[in-house]
Amino acid sequence: MDSTKTRQNEHPVSAAHIRNTIVDVLVPVAVDRPYSYKVPEGMALRPGALVVVPLGPREVTGVVWPASSEQVDVPSARLKSVLSVHDVAPLQDDLLDFIAWLSAYTLAPLGMVLRMVLRAPAALEPPKPMPGFRLGSIVPERLTPARQRVLDQLQEGFAWTKKGLAEAAGVGTSVVVGLEKLGALEKVLLPPQHTLLAPDTAYGVPELSDIQQQAADQLVASVDEGGFQPSLLEGITGSGKTEVYFEAVARVLDRGKQVLLLLPEISLTTSFLDRFTDRFGARPAEWHSDVSPKQRAQVWRGVADGTVRAVAGARSGLFLPFRELGLIVVDEEHEPAYKQEEGAIYHARDMAVVRAHRAGFPVILSSATPSVETLNNAQSGRYQHIKLNERYAAAELPDLSTIDMRVDGPERGHWLAPKLVGALRDTLAAGQQSLLFLNRRGYAPLTLCRKCGHRFQCESCSAWLVEHRFRGTLSCHHCGHTQKKPDACPECNSTDSLVPCGPGVERITEEVEALFPEARTLMLSSDMMGGVRRMKLELESVAKGDVDIVVGTQLVAKGHHFPLMRLVGVLDADLALGQGDPRAAERCFQLLAQVTGRAGRSGGKSAGLIQSYQPDHPVIDALVKGEPHLFYEREMAERKAGGLPPFGRLAGLIVSGEDKAAAATHAAALSRASPRAEGVRVLGPAEAPMALVRGRHRFRLLARAPRNFDLSRYLREWLNAAPKARGSVRVSVDIDPVSFF
């Protein structure tokens, strides 16, 4: 962080400075200030321009940074020159401001935040023209009907791509190639084509219910008023939240602005894109890890020049260089997946609000089960609070009840209680669908030897290896290590002694297939073979009714519309409650509410059965009674009493290292260096619950402070005063932590 300052201070102040030929350039490396470069004669640069500059022995792309009043003058003779300027639109001032703010808030180096903006390097190169064909001067002696159709297609004088011409003429591409060889077609270069159509706000205007229309009118009014306006759109599952906020999207598009729609999971994009297309007659641009580099480049460049009007994608979409962004929608705003846990650590929901606030436009947070922080902001008046309390088309919420596993549990070696099995049988007989939910991947969470007690543990993490029987492997879900399941115990060499402990979705699927061999059973899990493409096909098959019983993890719990789903069974509902995580109850409530909400969305009687060893727990009690306010009131009271968010502030410091003793020593030294401040309490260091991840030993410190305390500044002063980490030891800062593992 101090390297740039040292470099600038090496140069004595001279009277011979030419300030109008020097610019500051921020480069995407771990530095906290820009470097100064000379501007070659004839080159005009403004803040936000993307340039190529020398950095040591390399040439890198950076951004011209706004001049600082604290800048130290540097003699131009000692500076290197900007090499070239990329032919792309400059980054807008509001994005530069957002980069600086996020860096200061999260303590991430300024250059590392910029790196998140420059994630599509191919976008910085001008798009290449496409090869095409137009009518040539030679008429072939032999004209087949196929050749004639190609020539007829070109009579109007337009040029076509090879593929487009062949499809329009109804022939194979070999016919086009053959005509080109004969001289009947002439090769030309076509300008790059935009593959995305502009959304049509008048295309599929929906018929909204009265309550939906009122909510839509409120959101549209916030757009019309202009300026920053955060809104929480809270609606029960199946209430039509997406259709409601689409009306605000339409109004923003009509005003000539761009829209960013954030989704927490890639698995949700398929159904969302279909719903967007039904409403606007065109798909939005996609932005997530499964998009090809070529597509990413097209989207990045289109966003920057304004030709791409709407983008739907993951949290990294926040760093796209929008030319005229006018609205951000955060769908399923409560989802933990919005938290970036590595590199620059940030929460996309919170940063969406920040970006909207600093640029002065509306932001919509949508959820059936809002986060405690967002709901508190709405109840306190900081956010506009819009509610949808009924399902669309008078569809009813499922009737929820519990199965007390202490009394009515299954027999030994089985995992489905008799009452749930009976409900599955009745639903199957009625020709309707059932969903069994267990938030645990694989076949079993632990495999051990029943003869010597050996347990299979990851060598690089503090985690048991999960058996994936369908693949014959043992895997770590933290570092990705995978090994073949052995035939004998590696400790005592006993054969046929390895037994699985506990159920995963694979084991539940096995039990379902044994109970209902005639049923069409499908397992859905994030680690299934085939990736996103297969997931899309499987979800479509469920929606069409081609599946009778779905067994799935949390990826089936949210955002999907399964018209024939009438029964949801939740297994191990207490799984998330027995953790030392202050957010455990909130996550459990949200997950159970979301997954049971998959039933009955298209009308008709539906049910949810929750297997639990704690059926009287406040989380499950509030859910079954259909009174979420009971949970939120209790949760907020406990948070307030403990000074936890949203009534206090938290920040985590994670010290990790390849050597455990070195990491522990530095964590202790860091704790001793913590400054004294009124109302601030530093806890730790203590071994993290996941004490070893990817071969690195982890220790945590937690700083708790009052709500209005400047925790970022406190941490910056703390780290500046503390001993510097040495060797393999690293310190990462997590402002407003979501995970405590």
Image: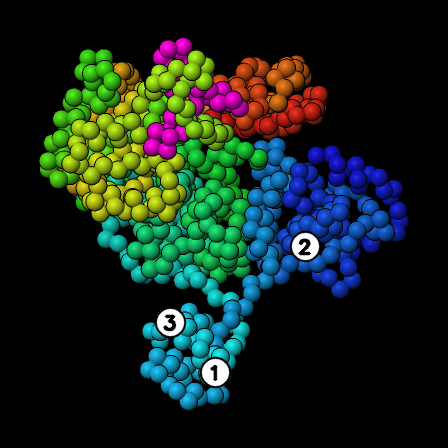
Q: At 19% from the left edge and 12% from the top edge, which residue is drawn?
A: 407
Judge the density around disc 3: few (<14), some (14-19), many (≥20) Cα neighbours within 10 Å: some
Name the secondary structure under disc 3. loop
Q: Earlier in the sequence, mark 1 or mark 2?
A: 2
Q: Is residue 216 above or below residue 624?
A: below
Name the secondary structure under disc 2. strand
Judge the density around disc 2: few (<14), some (14-19), many (≥20) Cα neighbours within 10 Å: many
Judge the density around disc 1: few (<14), some (14-19), many (≥20) Cα neighbours within 10 Å: some
Residue matched to label 1: 182
Q: Earlier in the sequence, mark 3 or mark 1?
A: 3
Left or right? Give the position of 370 relative to 616: right
* x then y, percent, for residue 221: 37, 49
Left or right? Give the position of 295 relative to 87: left
Three-letter amino acid code of the residue under disc 1: Leu
Q: Is residue 484 above or below residue 699?
A: below
Q: Earlier in the sequence, mark 2 or mark 3?
A: 2
Judged from this view, the residue extending furthest toward the top is 452
* x then y, percent, for residue 707: 51, 25
Q: State the scheme by which the image is colored.
A: rainbow
Left or right? Give the position of 50 relative to 308: right
Three-letter amino acid code of the residue under disc 2: Val
Q: Is residue 492 visible?
A: yes
Magenta stretch, overall SS: loop
- Circles 1 and 2 in contact, beta carbons < 8 Å: no
Residue matched to label 3: 172
Three-letter amino acid code of the residue under disc 3: Gly
Q: Give the CA distance from mark 1 to mark 2.
A: 46 Å
Q: At 46% from the left edge and 30% from the top edge, which residue is drawn?
A: 482
Task: Between label 1 and label 2, give the one nearer the viewer.
Answer: 1
Name the secondary structure under disc 1. helix
